[in-house]
Amino acid sequence: GAGVSQTPSNKVTEKGKYVELRCDPISGHTALYWYRQSLGQGPEFLIYFQGTGAADDSGLPNDRFFAVRPEGSVSTLKIQRTERGDSAVYLCASSLSSGSISTEAFFGQGTRLTVV
Amino acid sequence: AQTVTQSQPEMSVQEAETVTLSCTYDTSESDYYLFWYKQPPSRQMILVIRQEAYKQQNATENRFSVNFQKAAKSFSLKISDSQLGDAAMYFCAYRRPGTASKLTFGTGTRLQVTL
């Protein structure tokens, strides 16, 4: 696609429920990142995929959070037993695999998750 | 661990004037990249400008320029001839070179542009 697409744009769920957030990266981008942006804060890194594998998942806050990218394209962030503290905007970014400064990470518009 | 600090939660500038947003960072690395991102209400992060640490020359992109002081670990953004469309949140970010390298962001500065 033309840009990084995230669905849904907004999600309201009840405490304790399971949610899935989807990210469709730019075609051909092998690197994919998930970030979480709490109110009034900058985005915080959650997980990084290179192809199908999670190369760095050090930012996942606990085992309720899990992400997959089975075919190296679309990724899904899964949150089990949601808590009110999980309320945030979840941003996805993709880029080419090169780590040079010219490799720009393109962001989606995020999913605003509200846990009530 | 690297940290990025933006000490100005909000800034205001009149249209056509110049404004400078501050950013400091902490790292033990000698080579790294620094970025300024703009986040309008649409939530999409947009890259404004980038700087390589080993380049002494300050980066410039049209009305946007940086003042990079490596020894002081300072990376400020100057916006000249401010426009109403510049109003947004601005985030300073750090990244190490390499393929598996995430961005570390500051807490942001909200820029208001007034007539």
Image (cartoon, coloured by chain):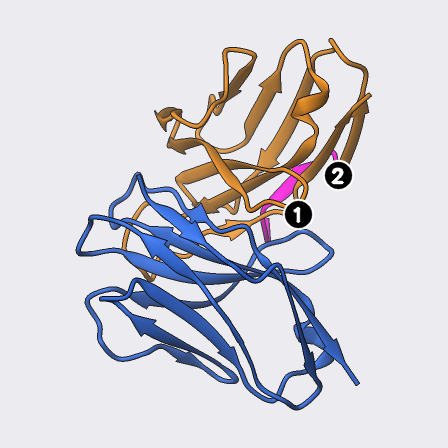
Quadrant of the frame with the C terminus of chain A: top right
- Per the rendering, the colour in which chain A appears is orange
Q: Mark 1, chain letter?
A: A
Element type where label 1 sits in the image: loop
User: Which x, y percent locates residue A99?
Assistant: 28, 50
Residue for point 51% across, 44% down: A93
Say few, some or many: other residues with alpha carbon within 10 Å of mark 1 (under 14 / 14 to 19 / 20 or more). many
Give the answer, above or below, for where B4 lies relative to A114: below
Q: Which residues are magenta?
A: A1-9
How much space separates mark 1 and mark 2, taking CA atoms? 8 Å
Q: Which residue is mark 1?
A: A109
Same chain under badges 1 and 2? The reply is: yes
Q: Colour of chain B?
A: blue
Query: What is the count of numbered marks?
Result: 2
Name the spot of residue B90 as percent of width and height, x first: 57, 62
Q: Earlier in the sequence, mark 1 or mark 2?
A: 2
